[in-house]
Image (cartoon, helix red, strand yellow):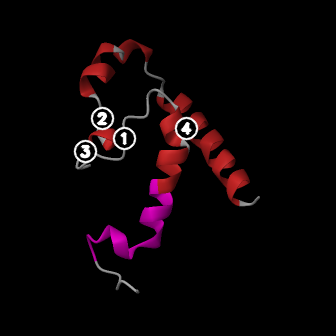
Amino acid sequence: MAIKTQPYNGKSKTIESAFGRFQMQFLKRDWFFTGQNITAKSDESKANEEFVMANKSNLPSLEDIKAVYAKRRQEWNACSSS
């Protein structure tokens, strides 16, 4: 069943499902990964704001986040190419 590409319709965009898998399989491994976005429907996908604020001083810097993201992307690519 084909779904026509439409604005604001995540199901119609293949990148949305691929990035969703990347988030759930790789980014979620890090304790500071807060979830997909602020409009997420499931509790699993929402940020735990109370936890984040309680650990604010332990959060990584932007440069640290970029390095972790690059590492997770390499892991994803290595897994995908196997």
User: Rounded to the nearest whole Å, what is the CA distance between mark 4 and mark 2?
Assistant: 19 Å
Q: Is residue 37 left or right of residue 57?
A: left
User: Rounded to the nearest whole Å, what is the CA distance between mark 4 and mark 1?
Assistant: 16 Å
**How many tags in the picture?**
4
Residue in view at x 52 percent, y 33 percent:
65
- Report the amino acid beneath label 4: Lys
Could you tell me if the residues under marks 3 and 2 are in contact, i.e. CB atoms within 8 Å?
yes
The secondary structure type at the circle numbered 1 is loop
- Report the amino acid beneath label 3: Ile
- Residue that badge 2 annotates: 47
- Residue that badge 4 annotates: 66
- For the stretch drawn in magenta, the main secondary structure is helix
Quarter of the view holding residue 11: bottom left
Q: Residues within 10 Å of mark 2 (few under 14, many from 20)?
A: some
Eye-nearest disc, 4 or 1 = 1
The vertical placement of 62 against 43, above or below, is: above
The secondary structure type at the circle numbered 2 is loop
- Report the amino acid beneath label 2: Ala
The secondary structure type at the circle numbered 3 is loop
Could you tell me if the residues under marks 1 and 2 are in contact, i.e. CB atoms within 8 Å?
yes
Could you tell me if the residues under marks 4 and 3 are in contact, i.e. CB atoms within 8 Å?
no
Q: Which residues are magenta?
A: 7-20
Q: Residues within 10 Å of mark 4 (few under 14, many from 20)?
A: few
